[in-house]
């Protein structure tokens, strides 16, 4: 189906085209090309990390981070119940045990009171997710992690452009994992990045990313590794995307402000709340709607040519994850069932945001009458 207003679309400039043509003209298309290092250096500077290691996608970033942090079979890793499955799958794939913790009903991010209760002697790491671009409660989480000596791996796939105090998400704890999938703030089509300030960890990440091969001695393998490298073609697009950061971030502010102006006075609609000291990025405008079936709302919007999408299903409710421990308050079940995300992309017109908002209000009015 071709939507009149899609939920997201990439913002590509002519620099992307020029850089891609340069890759072909110079005959460098693998991960060995010059754009890869430039993309890593520029990204590190942009977010204020000492090291940035590019990878093939955001899921690979999380998998690699777990491996390089030494998460072993039997270790427990805490994750929020409401997130994309890429947050939990790599935990299971390294042989560790995910421990699901419910979310806070206002911020939709991991509930730290419950999190602290789920820590035991096997707990090794926590993967907070900055859901829809809203930073998790990082200052307090860091205190908890310090107290129990736990590693924090930030899932920043949705939070490029979000800060806690003056620190960019992904630089607050040991390691941050970003995605450049086509619907993220900046994109390389498929791609990812890992940030860290720890030089030893950066080295481990690079070695495992490159088949576990020694950086000094070719074809000598130090550890079991993978090939999770980003190609020069992807990095070429990435290099053209980074200078767009400021305009993309400020455009997201315009979009969320417009949606809030239009919708927040309706008592049946709620937006995500932020923790103090945090600056969210409106990666995807997301609302919870009361007293209407989320699926009916999505279908009625679709009939008007507007693409929207449901929130993620609670992880614990899906077959691969249903047997893992889960501390519940009912929040993830409730928020997931009521949540939808609305069109949010660079350059979406105010007219379109107003049209989408009017359609939602109209659907809610009608749904009330019946
Ligand atoms: C997009 C996303 C990922 C995975 O990124 P890919 O690049 O698609 O592999 C991981 N976690 C969250 C929360 C995401 O939104």
Image: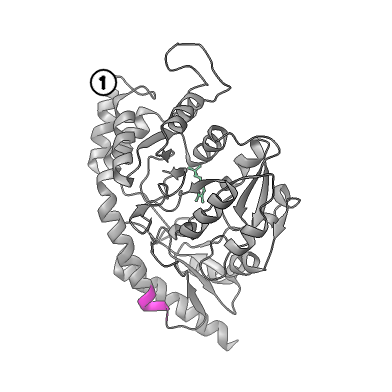
Is residue 136 visible in this depiction of the protein? Answer: no
User: x, y (%) of residue 88?
Assistant: 61, 46
Q: Is residue 110 placed above or below 68 in the rendered structure?
A: below
Is residue 326 visible in this depiction of the protein? Answer: yes
Based on the displayed image, in which of its 4 quarters is residue 283 positioned?
Answer: bottom left
Q: Nearer the viewer, residue 33 or 198?
A: 198
Identify the residue shown where x is 54% and y is 36%.
69
Identify the residue shown where x is 55% and y is 51%.
145
User: x, y (%) of residue 321?
Assistant: 70, 49
Q: Which residues are magenta?
A: 260-264
Q: Report the colour scheme.
A: one colour
Q: Secondary structure at mark 1?
A: helix
Give the crowd class for mark 1: few <14, some 14-19, many >=20 residues within 10 Å. Answer: few
Identify the residue shown where x is 45% and y is 49%.
156
Does residue 358 appear to the left or right of 76 in the view shown?
left
Does residue 296 appear to the left or right of 215 in the view shown?
right
Q: Nearer the viewer, residue 126 or 263?
A: 126
Q: Is residue 170 placed above or below 299 in the rendered structure?
A: above
Q: Nearer the viewer, residue 328 or 317?
A: 328
Does residue 21 appear to the left or right of 52 in the view shown?
left
Q: Is residue 3 placed above or below 261 in the rendered structure?
A: above
Q: Residue furthest right?
A: 323
The residue at which mark 1 appears reads as: 26
Q: Is residue 270 magenta?
A: no
User: x, y (%) of residue 70?
Assistant: 58, 33
Identify the residue shown where x is 35% and y is 77%.
261
């Amino acid at each position: 189906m071709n939507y009149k207003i899609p939920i997201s679309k990439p913002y590509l400039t002519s620099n992307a085209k020029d850089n891609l043509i340069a890759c072909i003209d110079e005959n460098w298309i693998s991960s060995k090309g010059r754009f890869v290092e430039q993309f890593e250096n520029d990204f590190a500077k942009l977010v204020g990390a000492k090291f940035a290691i590019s990878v093939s996608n955001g899921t690979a970033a999380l998998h690699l981070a777990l491996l390089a942090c030494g998460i072993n079979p039997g270790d427990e890793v805490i994750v929020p119940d409401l997130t994309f499955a890429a947050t939990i799958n790599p935990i299971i794939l390294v042989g560790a045990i995910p421990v699901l913790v419910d979310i806070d009903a206002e911020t939709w991010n991991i509930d730290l009171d419950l999190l602290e209760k789920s820590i035991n002697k096997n707990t090794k790491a926590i993967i907070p997710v900055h859901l829809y671009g809203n930073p998790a409660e990082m200052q307090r989480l860091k205190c908890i992690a310090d107290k129990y000596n736990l590693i924090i791996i930030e899932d920043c796939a949705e939070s490029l452009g979000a800060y806690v105090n003056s620190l960019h998400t992904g630089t607050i704890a040991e390691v941050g994992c970003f995605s450049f999938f086509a619907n993220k703030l900046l994109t390389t089509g498929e791609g990812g990045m890992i940030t860290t300030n720890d030089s030893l960890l950066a080295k481990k990440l690079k070695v495992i990313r490159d088949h576990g091969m020694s950086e000094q001695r070719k074809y000598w393998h130090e550890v079991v590794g993978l090939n999770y490298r980003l190609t020069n073609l992807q990095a070429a697009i990435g290099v053209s995307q980074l200078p767009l950061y400021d305009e993309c971030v400020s455009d997201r502010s315009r979009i969320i402000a417009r949606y809030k102006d239009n919708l927040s006075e309706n008592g049946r609609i709620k937006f995500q709340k932020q923790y103090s000291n945090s600056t969210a990025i409106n990666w995807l405008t997301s609302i919870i709607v009361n007293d209407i079936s989320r699926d009916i709302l999505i279908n009625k919007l679709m009939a008007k040519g507007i693409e929207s999408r449901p929130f993620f299903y609670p992880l614990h409710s899906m077959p691969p994850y249903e047997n893992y421990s889960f501390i519940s308050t009912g929040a993830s079940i409730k928020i997931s069932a009521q949540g939808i995300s609305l069109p949010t992309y660079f350059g979406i017109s105010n007219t379109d945001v107003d049209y989408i908002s009017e359609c939602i209000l109209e659907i809610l009015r009608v749904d009330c009458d019946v």
